[in-house]
Amino acid sequence: MSMLRYLARRFFFLALLLVGVSLTVFLIIRLVPANPAVAYLGPQAAGNPAIVAAFEARWGLDKPLPTQYLLYLAGLLRGDLGVSIRTGQPVLRDLAACFPPTVELAAAGMLIATVLGVLFGVISATRPNTLIDQALRGISVSGVSVPSFWLGLVFLYVFYHLLHWLPGPGRISARLNFIGGPTNFMLLDALLAGNWAAFADAARHLILPGLVLGMFSMGLITRTTRSSLMEVMSMDFIRTARSKGLARPAIVGGHAMINAAVPVLTVIGMGFCNLLGGVILVEKIFNWPGVGQYAYLSATGLDFPAITGVALLIAAVYAGINLVIDVLYAVIDPRVRY
């Protein structure tokens, strides 16, 4: 029952958070010293007062700011995020189309980051101050510090242009003539269609952008795993396990990692949130039709309904993943109760 009360309270605060995000983004967009009529109509048409007045009336820009926000909030409570100025489609429909590619890319990046980060962290923690420990710590620092746009360009030049090991930008090769399916998750749609060639090609297209996107989180996971595991390895119950003659793999995998998992899980959860919110440059470099591309085009065109919709989506994802991580704490560590 306490868990149900906890979840109800979190969902209540999630609703308040989304209202606050919508108000903040709404005000910031309206206060930007730029005219959406110029961005959408062009300078020549924007010089005609009649055309500008019709544009503002169409999008409700002729009303006072409080009225505009209340109308937007009323639509939001009905599940209506408005209509995109750039595409002319409901924002909710646009986000439903571009969110699956971003989730697919972020999941690939997080999978790469988690596998490499935990593996590197365990190796570093079990071999402290050795040459391999120093090398892995250097890799983790590089992953955190190197900009993703520079890394993406370098990876494209080396692995696609020079070595031809991996495919270039895009989600799938044009020669396969596979445009996806109902879910817009390319891997899932290829599986549902029984097209194994498309599945393999889509998976190969995920490697380069996923690796670029996951490098930052990989560095954080490596450092967190190393420090947390080294702290646990110095505790009394680990020394007791050693004194009983348990092998190192059994001690690390069966005892230490379970107790060191909570901070690592936190970093993984926050890393996945950061991947979803920070894919704009990577999607632009790799021509990935996701939320990042949609947000970039909406921002450059001052498409305020779309910008607000993207902000609400990212805020909801952050809050949802935080909730999942908090619940998993109680699963991993029996001492955690709500």
Image: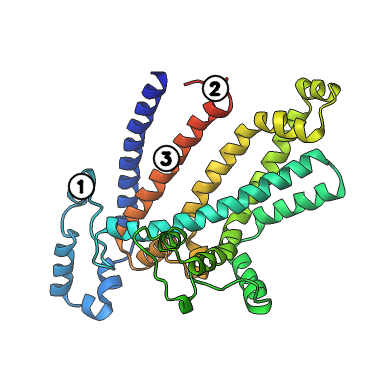
In the displayed structure, 217 sits above or below 180; it is above
* Residue with the mark numbered 3: 320
- The span from disc 1 to disc 3 (Cα, nearest Å) is 29 Å
- Of the numbered discs 2 and 1, the one sitting upstream in the chain is 1
Indicate the quadrant where residue 62 lies: bottom left
Q: Measured from the top left, where is residue 47 in percent x and y? A: 21, 77
Q: How is the image coloured?
A: rainbow
| Nearest-to-viewer mark from 2 and 1 | 2
| Residue neighbourhood size for the residue with mark 3, other residues' Cα within 10 Å, grouped as few (<14), some (14–19), many (≥20) | some
- Residue 106 vs residue 221: left or right? left
Q: Where is mark 1, residue-wise?
A: 66
Q: Quadrant of residue 294?
A: bottom left
Q: Is residue 136 above or below residue 208?
A: above
Residue highlighted by disc 2: 336
Q: Amino acid at mark 1?
A: Pro
User: Which percent across, then down, holds residue 60?
Assistant: 17, 58
Binning the other alpha carbons within 10 Å of mark 2 as few (below 14), some (14 to 19) or many (20 upward) gives few
